[in-house]
Amino acid sequence: MESMEKFIAHLGLIPPGSHVLCAVSGGADSVCLLHALYHLRAELDFTLSAAHFDHQLRGEESRRDAAFVAQFVALCCGPQRLPDGSQLPAVPLFSGSGDVSAQAAQMGIGTEEAARQMRYAFLHRAAQQAGATLIATAHTADDNGETILFHLARGTGLRGLGGIPPARDGVIRPLLTTTRRQVENYLAYYGLPHVEDSSNQDDSYSRNRIRHQIMPVLEGLFPNFAARLADNAALLRADEDYLTSLARDQAGQAQQSGDCLSIPVQTLLDLPDPVAARTIRVLLGQLNGGDQDCGAVHLHALLDLCRSPRPSARLDLPWGLTARREYGLLVLARRSSPPSMEPIHLPLPGEIRVGDWQVVCGAERYIGQPQGPLEFYLSQEAVSSLTVRPRQTGDRLTLLGRPGKSIKKWFVDEKVPRHLRNQVPVFAQNGVVAAVAGLGPDAACLPQPGERSWHISLTRLRRPEE
């Protein structure tokens, strides 16, 4: 097929020496793709395998499709003798099945989404088993047009208007500039059979209504509409790719620690919004192990978080992620529950772990040792027992030489991130604060030189996501 050959050559979709696994449902598009690839493999120097997945959604019709694909591959994709006398092997078929309805119910997602996830999971497994480096699917120019209109109706940007990508993550779409009419003409020319999926006639699906009711009207008004829309999509994808490349450069400034990424807020604010939003999307993708397909509403909310005057604002996101401001940083991380800090009695002397902290207390005579935020000395006369707990409403602290104020105000002034404030150990006796980790001891509890004291030292046990 000339349009497919040109498209493959133009984008280099199938490098010489590749092994392509062709997904075959038995429908017209996939039969056309498999047959065309079968006859191109010698010219383009690649190995070909086929794969079929039974979604178990249409009972006997699904079993009919699986049987048809097996028969078609056996009869039409057998050993191929070349003009020079050499022979290419028959195309092997890899088959699989899965209960899509049960999976959708278990995961709480739609049937179409469950089918897509299970189908691609099978295709990747089959590709690994076959030794294939590429997976080919039979998306056509019409499919691309339907996708673009669907995105446009829901609301989208350049990414959605670019439609289906010709190649991504090892999946290629060689028919993306080939129209459905060209596919039908190809099948008629070679006399190739195919099967029809009855669900494709069900207009309760939005995509089918676009296919049956909207696309024909547009084709009637603007002949070759699908092909021209595919050309426009290619131009828009080029613009999107350029903007995303700029965003990836900016995302390289982010610092990673475990499952946590941080980037200066000002870096994002200095960028044009289209690049800033894409930079955030790239970072979200890094956390989720791919190019995160997130909605504009989330990207705009994250930019608003950067612009917010609140230095410790927080935003929960889908995909198990959270975003927070830590003053001059935007921090993206996986949601996790920090270890709870329950009030606990500190043995004097002794050692305990509380939340993310290790606390060691020893008895020692005070001879003027320096007082620090994580290592300090408390008078044994002033302190006879200590409870280590999170902060409470009304807690106050007076550091030596500084005015007393609430612990909440201390945390704000010292720029302690909001999400960590309830995890900071507070040392209290009878409800009165004697010291706070990271700030130091209260002036009223300081020992005099020569006095017996409690020597307290703290070590933060960092979690992997921080």
Image (cartoon, grey):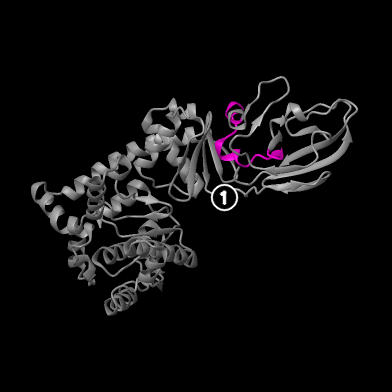
Q: Give the residue displayed 23% in from the left and 72% down from the top.
A: 195
Residue 82 in the figure: left or right of residue 213: right
Q: Position of residue 397 (x, y in %)?
A: 67, 29
Q: Residue furthest top?
A: 401
**How far from the left and from the top, in percent, is residue 234?**
29, 43
Magenta span covers which residues? 411-431
Q: Quadrant of residue 60?
A: bottom left
- In the depicted structure, whether residue 341 falls above or below residue 181: above
Picture residue at 19% right of the left edge, 66% below the top: 202
What kind of element bears circle 1?
loop
Residue 230 lies, with reference to residue 115, above or below; the image says: above
Identify the residue at image location x=49%, y=44%.
Answer: 322
**Could you classify mark 1 by the number of other residues whose Cα lies within 10 Å: few (under 14), some (14-19), or many (20 or more)?**
few
The quarter in which the C terminus is drawn is: top right
Residue underneath mark 1: 337
Judged left or right of residue 39, residue 128 is: right
Q: Nearer the viewer, residue 259 or 231?
A: 259
Q: Is residue 298 visible?
A: yes
Q: Is residue 375 above or below residue 43?
A: above
Does residue 35 belong to the magenta stretch?
Answer: no
Q: Nearer the viewer, residue 68 or 63?
A: 63
Examine the image and state in which quarter residue 297 appears: top left
